[in-house]
Image (tube, helix red, strand yellow):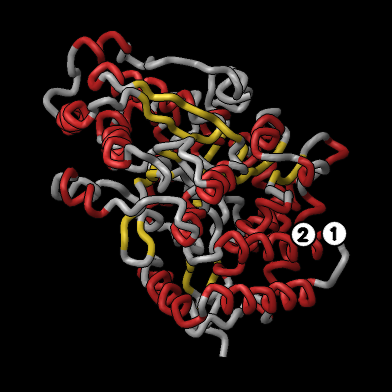
Amino acid sequence: MFGGRRLTRRRFSIGLGAGLSTLIAGPVFGETIDIKVAAQARGLVGDAKTLSVLLPEGSRANLEPVAAVFTKRTGVKVELQEVHVDQINAELMLNSVLGEAKYDVALPATFGVADLVAAGAIHALDDYAARYEPPGFRDPMLYQEGDRFDGQTYGFQTDGDAYVMFYHREMLRDPNEQARYADRFGYPLAMPETWAELDRQIRFFHAPEAGRYGGLLFRTPGYLAWEWWIRFHAKGYWPLSPDMTPQIAEDPGVAALEELIAITDSLVPDTSNLGLFENWARYAKGDVYCNIGWGGTQKYLNSPRSPMRGRMIYGPTPGGKVGGELLATPYFNWGWSFVVSATSAQKELAYLLALFAVTPEMSTLAVRQADGFFDPYRKEHYSDPGVEDAYSESFLKVHRASLDGAIPDFYLKGQSEYFQALGRGLDRALQGEVAPKIALSRVAQQWQLITSRAGREKQVQRWAQLRQKYPPNARRLLRDIA
């Protein structure tokens, strides 16, 4: 279920004060860039009458209204083809390997863009950008780190997926619980700033015999690495040294994994079997203190049919104390990006469709759709009444701050290999098959091999560039392990 409706249902809704007929009949936003881009696309159409778009399941609601306006203004039909959220990058990669021109535009997960570039699956956009993008067009995009790789532009970020924490308001603000917490620990019950505080609160609220659970953090292998990644950074260390030597198996990494494992007993018992959508549905029952997620999580929980609507407090993911100073490590770990397929025979037109979709007017139209995944990523989105209705003002405040201060994902060649190895190693330790130290040492060895295959010298350069994209305060506090 998504927004109170089945995820597979193909909805077509503008809603929130702007009907499709109004958008088609006349430009409600005035003579804006979307109108200019549509005119440029119309001049390129020629015999091309169709563009095929590969998109993740759950994003159709975002793109259908935008595609309809594009078709009306250009005469180009836009075919939307969905695949599962965890399969879209692999599908685009396979399409490239087979040399099939099935897709013109795709929306892969941002963390996979580097690997798609390395595989030759997507087309660089710099020449088109120089020709069509107005000066400063990308400036209001709050997160752009995944749009470029090796000095070239390959995508348009179209989904602001920074991790955010969700807290049960009634539990956190219950006077009796606050008094009990203060008596036990000697300080007030408040939104936690560090992972140590969060873990303490999760244990405090966990009371299965009373039908109450401490947390619903992800424990599936595919998502497990994200939590550990934040916990590790919050210890105050870089995951790799400047020469790409892994530092994850040293004491801070082992401690982060041991803490992740230890808190698992205070989570909902079946959390290890819950995928993305199941996690949302389970938290909506209202008997769990905290959860972790994205804007899509909030759209689900904030829907009129959700029992948790209006009952949550939001905060950034916890950080850690480094030399007595709080190191905040919000994390951009997913997101969808518009890219142009290398196999497309209509690359320029495909680029213009992507550009059209991320203009302020069209992207706002997409993000405000309550039944779609796309979350705010441009400054303009946060002042739109429809977007505020879909998310709530209190959530958007936390979301924007997290997006502004997010550490980037691991945008290196081989990202999927690095993180799959990490996820498997963490899961083996979580299942008790190997000790945390051994698990991480094996992952570190695998990372060394991945780096060698990718080309160590080039990877060192990429890692140096990526470190510079961390927020200034994180760069100041993060250290290499001597």
Q: CA distance from mark 2 to mark 1?
A: 6 Å
Q: Which residue is mark 1?
A: 431
Q: Position of residue 281 (x, y in %)?
A: 68, 30
Q: Amino acid at mark 2?
A: Asp
Q: Position of residue 183 (x, y in %)?
A: 71, 55
Residue displayed at 42% across by 44% down: 343
The answer to which image quadrant residue 24 occupies is top left
- Taking the view exactly as shown, the residue that stands out farthest to the bottom is 482
Numbered disc 1: secondary structure? loop
Residue displayed at 58% across by 75% down: 453
The answer to which image quadrant residue 234 occupies is bottom right
- Asked if 406 appears above or below 352 in the picture, the reply is below
Numbered disc 2: secondary structure? helix
Q: Position of residue 212 (x, y in %)?
A: 78, 37
385 left or right, relative to 102: left
- Taking the view exactly as shown, the residue that stands out farthest to the left is 31
Towards the viewer: 158 or 287: 158
Q: Which residue is mark 2?
A: 427
Residue displayed at 81% across by 41% down: 270
- Asked if 201 appears above or below 66 in the picture, the reply is below
| Quarter containing the C terminus | bottom right
Q: Amino acid at mark 1?
A: Gln
Q: Do residues under tags 2 and 1 come within 8 Å of each other at their CB atoms?
A: yes
Towards the viewer: 203 or 89: 89
Is residue 119 in view? yes
The answer to which image quadrant residue 232 occupies is bottom right
Towards the viewer: 220 or 52: 52
Q: Residues within 10 Å of mark 1 (few under 14, many from 20)?
A: few
